[in-house]
Image (tube, rainbow, N blue to C red):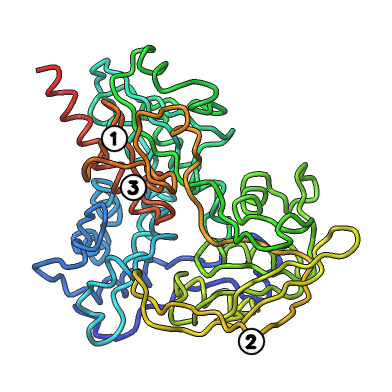
């Protein structure tokens, strides 16, 4: 029976006044009854427009149908045919601009809450069913995957299921890439990332941590070790800065450093060996999900006032609407159409204030958003004792510097020859943020799937 409600079933959340004092997950998830009620809003369209919006091609109407029937494990199996990380994607993917954007229900109301349903199915599976490792017959062909973020994990999963012996090389001491060090636990609990990684290891994939490709070991050495193909999924971890005066003052962080120290090193715990200075007033420069993550973390660390400073209006803010809504509930202050020009310090070299100018929105730029134009006659001073730069990232140049035969853009992104991630170096493929620059988890996963398929076809062609 179709549920004709125009609005989504609202997911329960932690009370804002409680959650700003902890790092526990904000969204609490659907109950079975809530999930089935939301699933009944699906019209089961024959042409399945939502599937076209999913970068990994999940059969969305099919898994939703199983939810309605109460067959939650069947729904999980449908999702798992296309996605390695349903618990993750259900939480952090921008469904509102992908699958839900094409949902027919969105024409006269809100789209079906596809992301919330995916999360429910995955969590239900892990709560009620044990994961039996897949018995895979090895073809004894070795493949190396560099980076254990969403692109690398997905490529490793697909290649492993095809019989390849896959080794993942990770630079940090904990696998998961941006899922582990970039996204706060209140959006993505780390035990969820760990259980997805453990599933992959049970499947036979080996993960070697503390290995930096281009320093600890080189790509050509991996080929000498017997690997027949290499997939580069190293992400984009090099932070950008504005280049304004005062960026070297004490109390200025890149969002990468700030979030890594919180998410990976647990800087919020009293026993942490890498604590972060507890600031009273924090300015976060940027308007994406990373900026909001940093701002909300700063609030949880004890900051009394946290500002988001963004050059455009709320309409152009690139962060997810859900995260913006949660940030507003938590008291984050949005300073729109404003840009930082100078960070001012005290005599001891610590941040004391930030000078900003107003921005006027002009004609659309190449991104389609209104171009921000500086109002040179304006000037505002905001008193802060910490500044976090969250204006984007680029790939670490180490791999390109150590492999000049891999072509890259001036920004350091690896150039691929086709949609399958083939690079200018034979049998080396790449995908995810190392190719596109900072993007989404699900797009990186899609790139990993395409590269795995191409690697398999190429190896078969060489062996035929």
Mark 1 / mark 2, whichever is N-terminal:
2
Q: Nearer the viewer, residue 368 or 128?
A: 368
In the depicted structure, whether residue 221 falls above or below residue 194: above
Crowd rating for badge 2 (residues with CA inside 10 Å; few <14, some 14–19, many 20+): few
Q: Name the residue under label 3.
A: 445
The front one of 247 and 80 is 247
Q: Write down the residue under mark 2.
A: 377
Mark nearer the viewer, 1 or 3: 1
The image shows residue 44, relative to residue 206, as above or below, that is below
Q: Is residue 380 above or below residue 219?
A: below
Q: Which tag, 2 or 3, sits closer to the chain's start? A: 2
Asked if residue 354 is positioned above or below residue 197 in the image, the reply reads: below
Q: Which mark is residue 255?
A: none
Q: Residue furthest right?
A: 347
**Left or right, residue 459 beside residue 318:** left
Near mark 3 (Cα within 10 A), the count class, few <14, some 14-19 or many ≥20, is many
């Amino acid at each position: 029976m179709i549920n004709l409600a125009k609005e989504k079933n609202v997911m329960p959340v932690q009370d804002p006044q409680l959650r700003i004092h902890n790092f526990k997950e904000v969204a609490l998830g659907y109950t079975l009854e809530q999930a089935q009620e939301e699933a009944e809003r699906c019209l089961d369209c024959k042409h399945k427009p939502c599937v076209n919006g999913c970068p990994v091609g999940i059969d969305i109407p099919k898994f939703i149908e199983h939810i309605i029937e109460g067959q939650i494990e069947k729904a999980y199996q449908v999702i798992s045919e296309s996605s390695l990380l349903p618990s993750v994607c259900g939480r952090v993917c921008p469904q509102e601009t992908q699958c839900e954007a094409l949902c027919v229900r969105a024409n006269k109301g809100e789209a079906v809450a596809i992301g919330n349903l995916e999360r429910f199915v995955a969590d239900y599976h892990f709560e009620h069913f044990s994961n039996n490792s897949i018995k895979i017959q090895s073809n004894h062909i070795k493949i190396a995957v560099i980076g254990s973020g969403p692109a690398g994990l997905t490529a490793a999963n697909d290649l492993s299921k095809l019989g390849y012996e896959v080794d993942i090389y990770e630079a940090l001491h904990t696998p998961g890439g941006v899922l582990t060090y970039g996204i706060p636990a209140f959006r993505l609990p780390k035990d969820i990332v760990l259980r997805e990684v453990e599933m992959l290891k049970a499947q036979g994939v080996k993960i070697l941590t503390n290995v930096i490709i281009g320093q600890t070991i080189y790509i050509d050495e991996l080929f000498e070790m017997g690997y027949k193909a290499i997939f580069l999924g190293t992400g984009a971890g090099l932070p950008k800065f504005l280049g304004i005066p005062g960026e070297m003052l004490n109390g200025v962080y890149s969002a990468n450093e700030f979030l890594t120290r919180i998410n990976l090193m647990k800087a919020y715990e009293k026993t942490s060996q890498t604590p972060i200075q507890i600031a009273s007033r924090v300015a976060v420069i940027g308007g994406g999900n990373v900026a909001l993550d940093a701002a909300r973390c700063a609030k949880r660390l004890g900051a009394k006032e946290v500002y988001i400073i963004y050059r455009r209006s709320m309409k152009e803010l690139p962060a997810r609407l859900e995260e913006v809504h949660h940030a507003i509930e938590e008291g984050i202050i949005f300073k729109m159409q404003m840009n930082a020009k100078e960070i001012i310090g005290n005599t001891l070299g610590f941040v004391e204030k930030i000078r900003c100018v107003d921005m006027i929105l002009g004609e659309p730029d190449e991104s389609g958003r209104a171009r921000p134009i500086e109002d040179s006659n304006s000037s505002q001073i905001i008193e802060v004792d910490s500044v976090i730069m969250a204006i984007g990232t680029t790939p670490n140049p180490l791999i390109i510097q150590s492999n000049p035969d891999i072509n890259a853009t001036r920004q350091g992104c690896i150039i691929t020859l086709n949609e399958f991630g083939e690079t200018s170096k034979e049998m080396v493929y790449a995908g995810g943020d190392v190719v596109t620059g900072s993007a989404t988890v699900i797009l990186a996963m899609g790139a990993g799937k395409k590269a795995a398929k191409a690697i398999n076809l190429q190896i078969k062609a060489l062996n035929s």
